[in-house]
Amino acid sequence: MTEPALDTRAAPRRRVSVVGVLGEVLITAGVLVLLFLGWQQWLNDIIVGDQLHGQSVHQSATWNKAEGPAKPTDPAAPPVMSATIANAQRFALLIVPRFGADYYRPIAQGIGVADVLNKGELGHYPTTQMPGAVGNFAIASHRKAYGGNLEHINDLKVGDHIFVETPDGWYQYSFRNLQYVKPTGIGVLDPVPEQAGVQPSDRMITLTSCNPFFSTAERIIAYGSFDKFFPRGDGPPAEIAATVNGKA
Amino acid sequence: MYAALWRVLPGPWWIRLIIVLVLLAAVLTALVLWVFPWVDQFVAPTDSTVGPGQ
């Protein structure tokens, strides 16, 4: 910007008025805010989602290399990770075909906003069980922004498969139902959801996110029940092979 | 402000237009790569977890 006095001499036809400059500054600020929202709510989800997909494919390949020959396992009674996972450490991957063929996202321990959720990871409630364990494997993620991992949680149809991948292999869950609760509705994390103190016999998965869009008024909950286990040595299930191999 | 920018740019109108578009692209790139991620940390996060203290 030139000084008004200089500018008047350089171009006597046009005077730069204070109001005019102020108006342009305000319009520019408004455009910047809109651009930021577009970036945060839409563009960055695509960028982050693509990065997470790439990282997940790489992680899976790393686990493949570490895998020995296939161990005999009972598909109905899968192995459960016994190692203690440090907070914010990635230990599993989530694949949901309903969310798109390139949906492949990391799951980390803990539900810290800054160290897990805002990195675009899904966070495992550390008080809940591990994948494949009898009880409830509960994970949380943002609905929009920071990767928007659970943006389409309300699109799940009964029977949709939800896969959790660990170094051992793939746990297949089937989506059962949605539930809407208050943010204090911690009953959804119970080993038998909403049945405090009841001894579990099933293997459940619980996804939590915020509802409605752009709000924190409620939480949307998706439940799934365990179907079967695919050991890593036998390769990924056909339904998600393209996703896992990075061909999607 | 923008009129002044247009006047100080050299060349015929189409050269100026190209310069403006290049400047605009540079500004947008800087916003997406550095400014927006930096601003993002100050924007109140939306909670997606359930817990007793919320």
Image: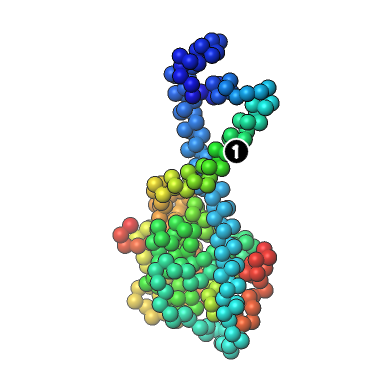
Residue A239 sits in which quadrant? bottom right
Could you say where residue A142 lies in the image, as x and y percent from the top left?
Answer: 47, 57
Could you say where residue A225 lies in the image, as x and y percent from the top left?
Answer: 51, 74
Label count reads 1
Q: Which residue is mark 1?
A: B25
Q: Nearer the viewer, residue A239 or A195?
A: A239
| Residue at the image point whose x is 44% and y is 23% from the top | A22
| Residue at the image point whose x is 58% and y is 53% from the top | A46
Q: Nearer the viewer, residue A203 or A44?
A: A44
Q: Nearer the viewer, residue B53 or A246?
A: A246
Q: Residue furthest left?
A: B53
Q: Describe residue A11's horizontal placement relative to residue A221 as left or right.
A: right
Quarter of the rendering occupied by the C terminus of chain A: bottom right
Asked if residue A110 shows in the view, the reply is: yes
A40 lies above or below B51: above
The amino acid at mark 1 is: Ala
The secondary element bearing badge 1 is classed as helix
Could you say where residue A177 lies in the image, as x and y percent from the top left?
Answer: 51, 66
Residue B25 sits in which quadrant? top right
| Residue at the image point whose x is 48% and y is 43% from the top | B35
A39 lies above or below A199: above
Q: Describe residue A58's horizontal placement relative to residue A129 as left or right.
A: right
Q: Residue furthest bottom?
A: A72
Assess disc 1: are there few (<14), some (14-19) or many (≥20) residues with their C-alpha within 10 Å of its C-alpha. few
| Callout 1: chain | B
A241 lies above or below A216: below
